[in-house]
Image (tube, rainbow, N blue to C red):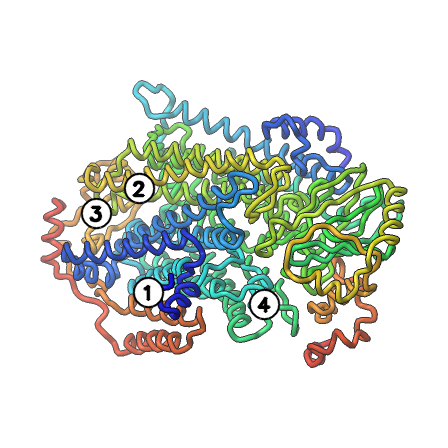
Amino acid sequence: MSLLRTRTVLAFVSLTALLLTGCSSRYLVLSPAGPVGRQELDLIVLSVELLAVIVIPTLALLFYIVWRYRDRPGNTAPYEPTWADSRTLEAVWWAIPIIIVAVLGFYTAKTTFALVEPPQKDVKPITIQVISLNWKWLFQYPEQGIATVNYVKIPVGVPVDFELTADAPMNSFWVPQLGGQVYTMPGMAMRLWLQADRPGTYYGHAANFTGEGFAHMSFDVVATPQSDFDKWVASVKASSPPLTTAGYEQLKKPGVTSTAEFSSFPPDLFDRVVWTNGGRYMQGMTGHGMTDHDMTSHGMDGHDMTDHGTAVGQTSR
Amino acid sequence: MDLLPLWFRRFADTYLMWDRGPLIWMSDVAILLTTIGIVAALTYFRRWKWLWREWITTVDHKKIGIMYLICALLMLFRGGVDALLMRTQLAFPGNTFLDPQHYDEIFTTHGTIMILFMAMPFIFALFNMVVPLQIGARDVAFPVLNAVSFWLFFFGALLFNLAFVFGGSPDAGWTSYPPLSELGFDPGPGENYYLLAIQISGIGSIATGINFLATIFKMRAPGMTWMRLPLFTWSVLASCLVIVFSFPALTAALALLMLDRLAGTHFFTMLHGGNPMMYVNLFWIWGHPEVYIVILPAFGVYSEVVATFARKRLFGYTSMVASLLVISVISYFVWAHHFFTMGAGADVNAFFAVASMAVGIPTGVKVFNWLFTMYRGRIRLSLPMLWTLAFIPTFALGGATGVMLAAAPADYQYHNSYFLIAHFHQTLIGGTVFGLIAGMYYWWPKIFGFRLDERLGRIAFWLFVIGFYVTFMPQYALGLMGMQRRMYTYPAELGWGDLNLVSTIGAYMMGLGFVVMVAQILYSIRHGERDLTGDPWDARTLEWSLPSPVPHYNFAVIPRVTDRDMWWELKQQGRTEELRPTADDIEPILMPKNTARPFFLGLSFFVAGFGAVFEWWPVAAVGAAGVLACFVAWESGEEEEELLPADEIRKTEAALGRV
């Protein structure tokens, strides 16, 4: 996308001007703070430019034609009521949109494939597991062993591998300044790469409607330098209560809560949530879906299988 | 309250929802007063028999069209009031005008009503009013089935609207994704209302699709070859092709979800091996083609209007036909763009992204052809043309944002945001609604025999169109600011307040525009200029050769078609007399007879649906028995057609001054 980068500034300015604002930072999508959001913005800008090529002349033509050929006394513009065909003209306007779609399609496909890869390959990524509940967000740090509710801290400059699922109706995880969203779905493990390039607190929100508390289901993504992040992990480990299975059942109950921290969580919680919501029927899922490690050891999770044990036997495993 | 018996209070709280506040009470009172008013008026003017004979039992496509139109306008009002309630709630951050539950119900019914109970009947109104007249036919292929379609729609809509005052509205969004719409998260009767009401009217829609396909294939006048078919009829053909292939997917999705809710199956829950993604796919396999179903006829309207009011042949007729058909085919390859963010692989997303953008190609071609139809023409700015001219820039921008949304990675940022809301309102209102209104204005004199007042129409136009831009342009910006759809409230810190207020002001302008439009219709019923020519716009196609309003047999003598813009060509050559019947040509006509069975069939479906909503199985059984009885009665073989004597036709034509 480097070809686009050069024009980005110009187009960004015009786009911002278009939106009649003096305060562009309010436009979260247009002020990305990481490589994913930036790639998405590049594509947005490219699409605006390509479409301007077709829309602006069309509008100009419309105003000209209506003004020139309106029915008023003494209009001397030519009137040819039977002129209704022109191979050349039609070839032109079949060709223009085809070319534009081809160009935009190419860059769209390229970005689509790019975004399933980590945004930066030479830095070791951090994994964070996300469970959307009615109506709150639970974040677990499998490598650090801590968990948070309704906010998530990430180290700056490190790609974050979000693994997401839902223990409630399906929702969508969206942090506009870092990059576009992905759904959280019961029984499935989804994946989203994001990365913050500068410290800050970024607005995140549930993007898919899940009922009464949906409007209040927001979270902050706090990006800090690695050293601060490590200090924060240590302090959470030292001073917060653990999240027990019973505590999770309590947290799961529908309702709106503020933020919270936990020094530990049941290690298999994420996998178990996927499993009990139907993940055991989803063996075939690959790619964005269940990774191998999601699926290990579930079969031994006896207590999860008691409810619907018979059903397991019915599926073609 | 203590004066009321306990059982009544319980009933009132559970079913009449009297504990839910003044909105419900006001609706109850309004419904009661309207019902009393209608009954009183019908009794006072002794119109019960008239209502039964002329309307409820009619199989005349023009009357069915009028009934569809009235329902569509009423539903536009209902959906519009929902919109204003939502916009009022969102005008200020932290507003408490509506509670979250009520807000959820209102946006759900707004979406469902506008798509299924406003746009659909509105296009069916135009199908019915215009298609047989344009192709030189006396009726549709299956007139009784046509009445069945209407009454299924009517009772489906009635059932859906009942939800607001009896038992509770659906609240899971117009898409109703499981698991949110499953019993576990949504126990109330609202979701059942949604499923059954849409199911009932959906059967009618499939029947309409089949009916008009058969009509266009089999009922064209001699000489009306495919390449002489008026563009509106072509657009109806394209739209009906999409209906017959896509509505069954919706039928299946709704039926399976209903089984999940009422019979305890697990088609769409992950437990026991179901999967909500199956619903999401089925819904959008219908849902995306659906937006083309409602916009293709609007494209047809624009084509007719542009040619008529630029006094010129439509530019690139063959291209226009090809692009309609191409759109109807591509419409099946785009559904997955509604869930780019549900974790499909990059390959799947890339395919659906490019397919979705590809729809822009034939659509863009159409816009250029409309422009060049006006080029070297003589453009008259009458009401239908004004709406068409407003459509072009609106749709060009809405189409452009559509292509922006189709770029999958960009969509990761727009999905479920106000950017998306702005986009689809811009195309659905700027494309479909503008087109339907243009069509209504255009064919109004043909159907009703009088013209609508231009001055009031212009006021309505400017209020509505300016209001439209004021409403939806800020929503693009709000989307880029990160505002999600379906939030009943938002905090002040995010700075969304100003633009939301502007948007709300715009919505009220649109509402005012609608009110002026209704005033225009009411004023014109009394004061509108009577159309004695049958051809008030100096138009081009066959329907304008008939007197307005059209006699119920349409054509006394079926015309022989020799040209694409047949009526225009005859006018140019001074040969219009050729389309006038002579007394000798007139022969007796076999016309379909009025029948009450479609009405009773619809009513039975209503009773069955109502019973199923509350799982009152005896009531449902009564309805089902009624449905069965209607089918049995059908088989008993009542006379379906009657012969209209030639003398009577001669008399009618003579009274119209045509023989």
Mark in the foreground, 3 or 1: 1
- What distance separates the C-alpha of mark 4 from that of mark 1? 36 Å
Q: Is residue A289 left or right of residue A230?
A: left
Q: Do the CB atoms of the residues marked 1 and 2 lie less than 8 Å apart?
A: no
Say which amino acid is labelled 1.
Answer: Val
Whether discs 2 and 3 lie on one chain: the answer is yes
Q: Position of residue B212 (x, y in %)?
A: 37, 58
Label placed on residue B148: 1
Please rate how many residues cluster around mark 4, counting C-alpha atoms within 10 Å: few if below 14, some from 14 to 19, many from 20: few
- What distance separates the C-alpha of mark 2 from that of mark 3? 21 Å
Mark in the foreground, 4 or 2: 4
Labels 4 and 1: the sequence-earlier one? 1
Labels 3 and 4: the sequence-earlier one? 4
The residue to which callout 2 is attached is: B518
Labels 3 and 1: the sequence-earlier one? 1
Q: Position of residue B83 (x, y in %)?
A: 45, 45
Q: Chain of mark 2?
A: B
Visible in this render: residue B641? Answer: yes
The residue to which callout 4 is attached is: B184
- Picture quadrant where residue B573 is located: top left
Q: Chain of mark 1?
A: B
- What distance separates the C-alpha of mark 3 from that of mark 4? 54 Å
Q: Is residue B182 left or right of residue B36?
A: right
Task: Please tell me whether mark 2 sits on a helix, a strand or a loop.
Answer: helix
Labels 4 and 2: the sequence-earlier one? 4
Say which amino acid is labelled 2.
Answer: Val
Mark in the foreground, 2 or 3: 2
